[in-house]
Image: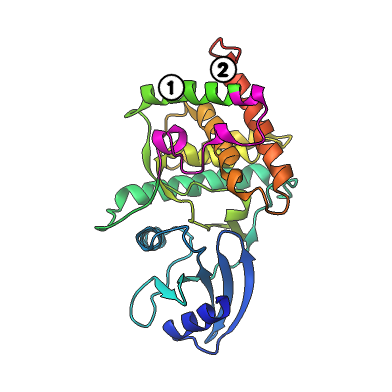
Amino acid sequence: MTAAAVEQSLVLWGMDGAEKRLIATRENQVYRVDHAGRAYALRLHRPGYRTDAELWSELQWMNAAAEGGLHVPAPIPSTSGEFLHVADGIQVDVLTWLSGAPVGKTGEDLAAADRTGLFYGIGREMARLHAVSDRWTPPAGFSRWSWDREGLLGETPVWGRFWENPSLTKEDRVLFLALRNEADAELQGLEGKLDYGLIHADLVRENVMADGNKLQLIDFDDSGFGFRLFDLATTLLKNMRETDYPALRDAVIAGYLSVRVIDLGALDLFILLRSATYAGWIITRMDEPGSKARNQRFIGTTRVLAQNFLSGKGMQP
């Protein structure tokens, strides 16, 4: 099926016969396609994960971000002018190919020479994305999921019911339920006061590409509507184990504030909530290689953050 989808896609984009090679198999299969002296990224989307409307909306937003001056993959229209097609039953699209390499890999020591400079740049580009998004009017039919209070803590969170992770101990379950209840109450009190709009939602190291001094943001698969602090929290959560984390945190925030203002009062709450989402995300991926260790890491990090959060409220679940 995959081979047929690839070949049909190349015909749809007028690239039949082009060289191609598989380069990523995460949520989607991504092929590098070389055609007429240029490189492209052909994406085959995981069946059933996104609706056509959601994928079309993602591509529309990426196109607006690229037109707004962000260094992001821009969608390439097919020969019929469409950004999205279905080939052999699989949703497919083609993006510009970005040069450079990821700034790092989650779980490994950060190898960047100018670490604070890098994180200042990440914060700056994140803020530029938010600013461009606020100036853009989504077209009719635009549809992306929402990392709002319901999407984080409701009955059907975007990434799953983290408090029902099957690996939780009895004590963890009590802790995670208390976290859910208290965080929900706190977010309820903040509704209408926090910066909210389109967010990337997954600015981890693998999704920031460096080409010299140019930083490029990739993989908008999890993007949607959400609290802007969620983007900052995602980047910070994945770097908390670095020995110079306080300096990296300050640098990300400084870079962000160099472009636009944001109320940082609830940032630690969103770092906790971001951590909890991973304990939900892993539930449907328990049979994947390395998932057992990742699951325990996600639970352990959330446990510590939740204990700190609740103890700050005078609670000892």
Quadrant of the image for the C terminus? top right
| SS state under label 2 | helix
Query: In percent of the image, x 48 and y 60: which residue is there?
Result: 71
Q: Is residue 275 above or below residue 56?
A: above
Q: Residues within 10 Å of mark 2 (few under 14, many from 20)?
A: some
Name the residue nearer the viewer: 205 or 226. Answer: 226
Q: Quadrant of residue 293?
A: top right
Residue furthest to the top in view is 314
Q: Which residue is mark 2?
A: 310
Q: How many marks?
A: 2
- The answer to whether mark 2 and mark 1 are in CB contact below 8 A is no
Q: Amino acid at mark 2?
A: Leu
Query: In percent of the image, x 56 and y 9: which residue is there?
Result: 314
Q: Which residue is mark 1?
A: 186
* The stretch drawn in magenta includes residue 162: yes
Q: Is residue 202 above or below residue 161?
A: below
Q: Is residue 235 above or below residue 61?
A: above
Q: Please indicate, yes or no, whether residue 213 appears anywhere in the rendered image.
A: no
| SS state under label 1 | helix
